[in-house]
Image (cartoon, rainbow, N blue to C red):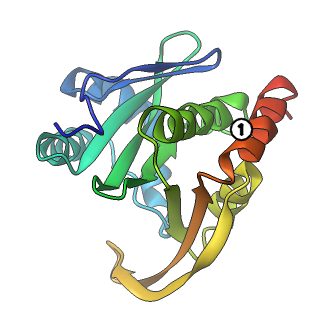
Amino acid sequence: MSRLGPPELTLKGRHVTLVPLCRDHAEALSSAAGDLHALWYTTVPSPKGMLAEIDRRLRLRDVGAMLPFTQLDAGGQPVGMTTYMNIDHATPRVEIGSTWIAPSAQRRPLNTEAKRLLLAHAFEAWSCLAVEFRTHRLNQQSRRAIERLGAQLDGILRAHMVMPNGTIRDTAVYSVTAADWPSVRAHLDGLIARPR
C-alpha cells in the first residue's frame, strides 16, 4: 500500500469506529443494508450482492486505489461502509465516498463523526490538499448531509456516469480544502457535541 495507507488503518470516535472492511462483515452488513439497494439514485449493495461488493473494494484496496472501512456503531455493530477512494498519491488528494449507513443509524452523530475522523486523518496525517465528496445531483438527502459537513460545491459533472438502472447520473462534486479544514473541524466538533 502507498503512503496513504496502511490497509489496517482503524479510526475510533465516541459514536463510530471505522475498521478495515473484511469478508467477515458480510452477513451483518447485509442485514444493516436492508432495502437501501432499491433507491435508484444511489449504489448500495443488495444483501445478496454484499460479499461481491466487499471483494470488489478489497481488490481496489490491494492496488492502492481505495481504503475501505466498515462503520461500527458505539456497540460494535456493523452499520455501513465508507471509503477513501480516487486516491491521488502525488497531490495528495482523496475522495470520501461509496458510503452508506443503515437507516437505524442515520440522522445521528455517527455519520458526522465518521466524516470528521476521515477528514482529520486525510488532512492531519496525510497532509492532503483537498478531500472530495461526490453524489448524484438528485440525491438531496446526501447533498444536504455533505453541505452540513461544511463542504463547498465545486460544480456538477454532467452525464458523468451510467447508473445500474441505465439512467445517466449528473454528479455533484464537493470539497473541503486544507485551508478550510480548521473551521470545518471546529464546525464538526460543534455538531458532534450538540447532535440533532
The image quadrant of residue 162 is bottom left
Q: Which residue is mark 1?
A: 185
Q: Residue at x 64, y 14 (%)?
A: 14
Using the image as rendered, state which of residue 189 and residue 46 is in the foreground.
Answer: 189
State the residue lying farthest toward the top. Answer: 75
Residue 48 makes an appearance in the image: no
Which residue is rendered at x = 36% and y = 33% of the image? 69
Give above or below for 106 relative to 66: above
Q: Position of residue 65 (x, y in %)?
A: 22, 51
Number of dots carrying numbers: 1
Place of residue 154 in the rendered image (x, y in percent of width and height, measured from the top left):
60, 75
In the image, 62 versus 25, the foreground residue is: 62
Tell me the kind of residue under disc 1: Arg
**Quadrant housing residue 95:** bottom left
Query: Judging from the image, what secondary structure is the residue with disc 1 in?
Result: helix
Image x and y of residue 77, in percent = 47, 16
Screen quadrant of the N terminus: top left
- Residue 46 visible from this viewpoint: yes
Residue under the image location 49 percent in, 50 percent down: 36
> Is 164 displayed left or right of 157 in the figure?
left
* Callout 1 crowding tier (Cα within 10 Å): few <14, some 14–19, many ≥20: some
Which residue lies at the image location 35% right of the left edge and 76% below the top edge? 165
Depicted 117 relative to depicted 10: above or below: below
The C terminus is located in which quarter? top right
The x and y percentages for residue 48 are: 25, 43
- Residue 51 versus residue 141 in the image, above or below: above
Q: Quadrant of residue 115?
A: top right
With 154 as the anchor, is 109 left or right in this view? right
